[in-house]
Image: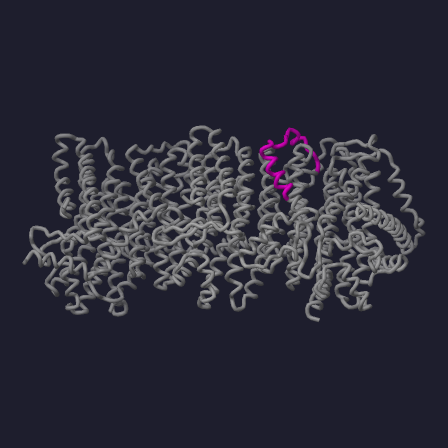
Amino acid sequence: MNMIFILFAVLLGGALLTFFSNKVSGLLRDIFFLLTVLAAGVFFYLFIKKGDTVSFSLAGLNLQWGLNAFGWYFSLIVLGLSTLAAFYALAYMRGKERLGYFYFNFLVSILSMLGILMSRDLVSFFVFWEIMTWSSYFIVIYNGKNVQRNGINYIIFSTIGAYAMLTAIVLVYTNTDSLIISDMITSYPQFTPVLQIFVPILFLMAFSVKAAMMPLHVWAPDAYSNSPMAYSSVFSGALSKMGIYGMIIVFVTMISYLPDSTWFKEIFAWLGAITAIMGTLWAVSQDDARKLLAYSSIAQLGYIITGVAIGTELAMLSALFLAVLHGLFKGALFMAVGAIERQTGTVNFTEVTGLIRKMPWTFIASLLAIIALAGIPPLGGFVGKWMLYESLINSNHYILVIAIFFASTAAFLYCYKFLFGFFLGQEEKEWEHVKEAPALMVVPMMILAIGTVVLGTFPGIILKPADIAMQSLGYAPTEGHLWSMSVLFNEWGDQVLLKPLVYAIAGIFLFFLILLTVKGWKTMRYVTTKDISSSGEVPLEDENLTFSINFFQPFMRAAGPVMKKRMITYYREFGKAIDILFDFTRRIYNGNGQTYAIYVMIFLVILLLLKNNLFG
Amino acid sequence: MVGSPVLFIAVPLLAAFLIPLLGFVWKESVRILPGLVLLYLLILSVTLMGQVMQSGTIVEVIAGWSPPWGINLVFSPLTGFLTTLMILMGFIIWIYSYRFKNVDFHEAVKYFILLLLMITGSVGIVLTGDIFNQFVFIEITSISAYALTAFYKGRDSAEASFKYLMIGSLSSMFLLLAIVLIYSQLGTLNMADIALKAHLMKPEFKILALIFFLTGLGIEAEIFPLNGWAPDVYSQAPAPVAAAFSGIVVKAGVYAIIRVIFTLFDVSGTHQFLIIAGIITLIIAEMAAIKQERLKRMLAYSSIGQMGLVLVAFGIGTEEGIFAALFLMLNHAIIKPLLFLSGSYLVYHSKDKFINETDGMAKHIPLTSFLFALGAVAIVGMPPFAGFWSKWFVLSAAAHANMILVIALVLFVSIVELVYYFRVVNRIYFFPKRKEIEPKKPTINALIAMGMLGIFILVIGFYPDSVTGYLHSASHSLLEKGKYIQDVLSIGQSLTH
Amino acid sequence: MGEILQYTWGAIVSFVLAFFVGITYMGLSRIVTARVQNRIGPPWYQNFFDVFKLFSKDTSIHHGIMHHMGPAFMMVTAVMSLLIIPIFNGGSFFTNLNFHGDLIFLIYIMVFGPLGMALGAGQTGNPNSAIGVTRGLSQIVGFEIPWVMALVALMIQYKTTSIVDLMNIQAETGKWLMFTSPFAFIAAVLAMLGMFRYAPFDIVGAPQELASGPMSENGGKYLFVMMSSGAVFAFAKLTLYVDIFMGGANNLIILVVKTFILYMIPVLYGIVSPRYRTEQSVRFFWGWPTLFGLLAILQAAFL
C-alpha cells in the first residue's frame, strides 16, 4: 500500500467517521475531526517524500499521483492553515447545526486540495478540482442565507471554469494520448498553434475562477463572506491558492513556450492589477467585515496573479511568498471576524465599535495581520510587496507598478476601516458585555499573526522552500542573489537588510514608548472614550459619537466614476437574456397533444424533405 | 447452459398470468412473485452475461424455426448488458414498490402485472433479432405503459396517457410502415438477414424505411420534437413507473434506434443525424427543464436531455463513443430512477408537486434527501460519482473524433443542468422547513431500493473498472455488424443442416 | 556591539539636528505666513517654546493603549526615514542605515507612522479624530500616486532603487536630477504639497471644524512627541527631496538653504490657497500631478 493512498484513505475515512459519529456524540465528532486533520498533517510531512509517485489504472486511464517540491510548498499553506482553522472551527462552530456535514466537507476539501497538489495526471487533477468545488460549495451554502444566489453563482462560475479545464484536458488527451501532466508539458511545444493558444487559455479560465480574477470573480465576495468564518480562512487563504498553483504551472510550462508570450503575460498581469484595484476599491466601500475581507482577498490574489504573470524570478518568488503570507494574514483576519461574530453577533462596522479593551488578543492578531496586509514594514507583508514592486520595476512594467501601488495604498483605507470599525472608536454601552473569544479561537489566529511577524524579519524561512519549489519548475536557484535569510535583493543589486531595519524600528518604537510611558507615569490616567473634548465641549453621556457610517465617503466620491458599473450587472443582463431564451424554449412543450402530434408530422416531413441531404 | 434467453420472455409472461390466479390463493404472492421472477432473471442474466463474455454471443431460436425464418433471441454482450441492466432496474423498482397500493388488492394486481409486462416488453425489444417481433414487444411495452401512466385515474394522468397513446399509435404506424417496406423489398424480417441484404434494397425505399424507423423509434427514444408526450407521462405516472420509464423503457427505445442505425442499414449520414437530433434534444430539453416549476417535470425533461446526450455519444460512432454512450445509459439508468424515486417522496405531501414545496425537506426525511442530493450531484457529472466517468468518456470520444462543437455544447448544457439540480438541492437542505406539511416517510423497502441505487453510484464512481469491462465488450459487439450477422445466421445454418 | 553604538549615536545626532532644524522651520514658516498676511508673527523660536511647554506639562490623559502608542508610531516613521535618507553627500558621515533600505522601503516606512497615529487617534473615540483620519488616509492615496510615479521614473531611468546611488549619479554627472528628470521633479513637488498638509490640503487637521482632527485628543507629552516627530519628519522629507532631485548637500549650510527653499514651496502655496474638500484634493492629485508623473515615466522609459 502506497503512502499516498494511505493519506487519502486517512482523510476520507476520517471525514466519514466524523460525519457518522455526529449522530453518536458531539465530542466524538470533534475528536475525530481534529484527529483526522492532525493525522493527515503529521502523516504528510513524515511519510510522504518529495518525489514519491504512484501509478495506477482506473477505467482504462493511466493515472499517477505524486508529490514534488512545488506541490509540497503549497501543501504547506493548505495543511498549515487547515490545521489551525480546524482548531478554531471547534470553538467557532460550537452549538451550530449540521456540524457533521460541515466537518465532513471541511475534511473533504482538505483532501481535494492535497489531491490537486499531488495529482500527476489531468484526470485526477480534474476530479480533485471538482471535489474541491462541491465540497466548498456545500460549505458556502451552509449558512443558508441567500443560497440560491450565492451558491448558484459560485457553482456556475466554478463549473464554467472546470469545464473549460475539462475541454482542455480532453484536447490534450486526444493530441498526446497521455494524461500525465509532464507528458503534456513536454509535448506542448509540438502542439498546433491553435491548440497552443487554447489549451492554456482554457486552463487559465479554470484557475482564474478559483483565484477570483476579474472578470471571473463575481462569485467570490458572496462565497467568501457567507461561509462560516472558520472555513473562510481556509477558503480564501488556501483554496484560492489552488488557482494560483495551477496558474503558475500553466504560465511556467506552457505560456513561456508560446512564440510570442509577452502580450499574453501582459494581459494577465494587467488583469491581476485591475483585479487588485477594483477589489481594493470595493473593499473600501464595504460595511460588512466579511465582505470587506472577501474583496480584499480578491485584491490580494490580484497581486499574486500579476506576479505570476510577470514570471521573472523575483516576481515568481514574490508571488509564492505572497501566497503564503496571504494565507497567514487573511486566515487570521477571517478568524478574527469569526471571533467578533461569535462574541457580538454582528460583523457590521456600523453596529459594533470599541472592542479593543474587550477583545485585546483578537485585536492584536488583527492588528498584526492588518499591518502585514498593508505591506508595512517590519512585517512579512512588506517583504512580499517589496519583491513584487522591485520585480515589476526591474522588468520594465512602469505603469503596472503604479497600478499595483495604487491598489496597495488604497488598501490602507480598508485596513484602517477594519481596525477602527471593530476595535477603536467609541466604546458603547451596548457592547460592554462582550468577552474575549475562547482560547481555541484566539491561539490559532495569534499563531498566524506571529507568523507574519517572523516572516517580516526572516523571510528566508519561506523563501527557501519557495526557491526549491521554483527550481522544480525550472528556475535557477535564487538564494544568495535575490534573497538570503533576512536580506532581499532586486535584480539590479539593490538591497534591503531586514534585520537592522527591524531592530531599528523596534528600538525607536520602544524608546519612545518608554519615554511616553515613564514620563509623568504618576499623573497619567485613563479616561473613557466618552470623556473627550468635542469641539471644545465635553459631550453628554448619551450623546452618540460613533463615526462609522459612510466612513470613507469623500474617497468614495473621488473614486466613484470607476465603480459605477459592476461586473455582476453585465452577468445579470446576460443571465436575463438567456432566461428569455429558456422561457421561449419551454413554450415548445405546450402540453397540447395535438401540437405534439403535429410536431411528429413536421419531423417526418423535414426528414423526408432533407433525406437527400441527410442520408446517402 | 444455465438457462436460455427465451426465459427472459417466457417466465415473466407466465408470471404475469399467474399473478391474479395466485392472488386468489394468497394475497401477498401478488407482490412476492414479480420479485422472485425478477430476481431469478437477474441471476440468470448475470450468469449468461458471464458466459457471453467468455464464449461469445448466444443466439436462441424459438420453436425450432431457424433464422432468418423464425424468431430468434440474441444475447450478445450488448443486448445482454442492457437486459441485465433493465432487469436489475426492474428488480430495484419492485423492491421500491413492494408496498405499493398496500390496501387495494386489485390495484396492486394490475400494477404488478403491468409492470412485469412492461419490463418483459422492454427486455424483448432488446433481445429479439426480428424486427416484427421487436414491433410486437414495443406494442406490449407501450400498452402497459399507457395503462400505467393512467394508473391514478385522475384527470391529468388520463390526459397524459391519452397523449402518450396518441403519439404512440403514430409510432406504431410508422414502425409498421417501415417493416412493411422492408418486407416488401427483402422478404425477410430477421435483423441479421436484413443487414446482410440491405444493399439489395432500392435506395429510396431504404431511406424511406429508415425515416419511418427513425420517426417511429424516435418517439420511443424521446428524440426532439417527438418527445412531447414524455414530460406529461413522467410527471403523471406513479413514481416507480416514471423510474421504470427512464430506467428501462427509454433504454429499450434507444437500443432499437441504435440497432436500426448500426446494424440494419448501411446508409451514411445516420451518425450525423444522431448527433444533430441528439444535440437538439439535449439543448431544448435542458433549457425547458430549467424553467420547470414541478419537480417531476423537471426530472422528465432532464431525462429527455440525457437521452439526447446518449444519442450524441452513439452518433460519434467510434467504439469509444459507443462505450461512452453505453456508460451514459448505465449511469442514467441508475441515477434517474433514484431521482424519481427519492424525488417523489420529496413532493409526496404536495398536490401540485411544485419544486418550491420541497423547502427544507432534509429536516423531515434526511436519508431520502441525501439520496436525492447524491443523485443530483452524480447526474451533473461531479466527480467522484458515477456521472463523471460517462461525461468524461463522452467528451474524450468527441475530442478524438474532433467534434469540438459537441464538447462545447455538452458542457454548456451541463452547466444548465447543474443549475437546476443544485437549485433543488439547495431548497431541500437550506430553505427553512415548512412546519405545516407532513411529508410521507419512505417505507423501509423504498429506502433499500434507493440505497442500492446510491451504492451503485458510489461504486461506479470510485471504481469504474467494475463495469468498464462489460461496457467495452458491449460497445465492441455493437460495431461488429458482420459478426452479428454471422452469429445469428450460422445458428440458422447449423439448425437446417 | 560597536555597530549598535554607532547607529545609536548617529541616530541621536541626526535626530537632534533634524529636531532643531525642523522646529526652526516651523517657526519661520509662521513668520513667513504672518508677513504675507501683513502681520508680524511670532518670533522664529516660538515653536521651541511651544514644544517645551508641551513637554513639561505634567498631567496627561489617554484613552487606551493604542492612543498611548500612537505618537511612538509616528516617531518611528520620522526617525527611520531620517536614518534611511542620507543627510550629506559622500556618505562617510551620518550614514546611519542608508545602505540598509531603498526607496520602496522608504515609501512604506513613511506611511507607517501616519497609520499608527491614525490608530491612536481612532481609540480616542473622538469623532473628529476619526473624520480627520479618513480624510488624511484618502489624501495619502491621492498624493502617493504622483509621488511614487516620480520615484519609479527615477528608478527606471537610473536603474537603481537606492537613494545613495541616485546621489552618486548626480555627483558623477554633476547634473541635478530636477533638471534631467524635470517631470519627475514637478510630480514629486506637487505630491509634496499634499505631504506637508498645508493649505489647500489641510482639511485633515482642519483646525476650525475638526478641532485639529487626528491630534484633537492629544496634549502634553503626546502632543510633544507628535510635534517633534512632525518636525523631524518634515526635515527628513525635505532632505530626501534635496538628495534625489537637488544633488544632495555637502555641508549643513547648503542643506539648510536647499531644504528651506523647498520648504517654502508648500508654505507659500498654502498661504495663497483656500482649502480643498477631500475628494477635490484627491482628484487634484490624480489629475495634473499624475499626468506629470506619467510624463516622467515616459521620459524615463523612452528617452
Whole-percent x, y for residue A410 in the image: 67, 51
The residue shown at (61%, 32%) is: A437
> Percent position (x, y) of residue A418?
65, 43
Q: Is residue C189 above or below residue C22?
A: below
Name the spot of residue A87 as percent of width and height, x first: 55, 35
**Residue shown at 40% from the left, 63% from the top:** A175
Of C25 and B430, which appears nearest the observer? C25
> Which one is in front, C98 or B230?
C98
Residue reaching furthest bottom? C303
- Whether residue B59 sits left or right of residue C287 in the image: it is left
In reply to whether residue A433 is colored magenta, the answer given is yes
Q: Can residue A586 be seen in this snapshot?
A: no
Image position of A30 with respect to C128: above or below: above
Left or right: where does residue B347 sit relative to residue C195? Answer: left
Image coordinates of residue C269 in percent, x first then y, are 83, 58
Image quadrant containing the N terminus of chain A: top left
- The stretch of residues the image draws in magenta is A425-451
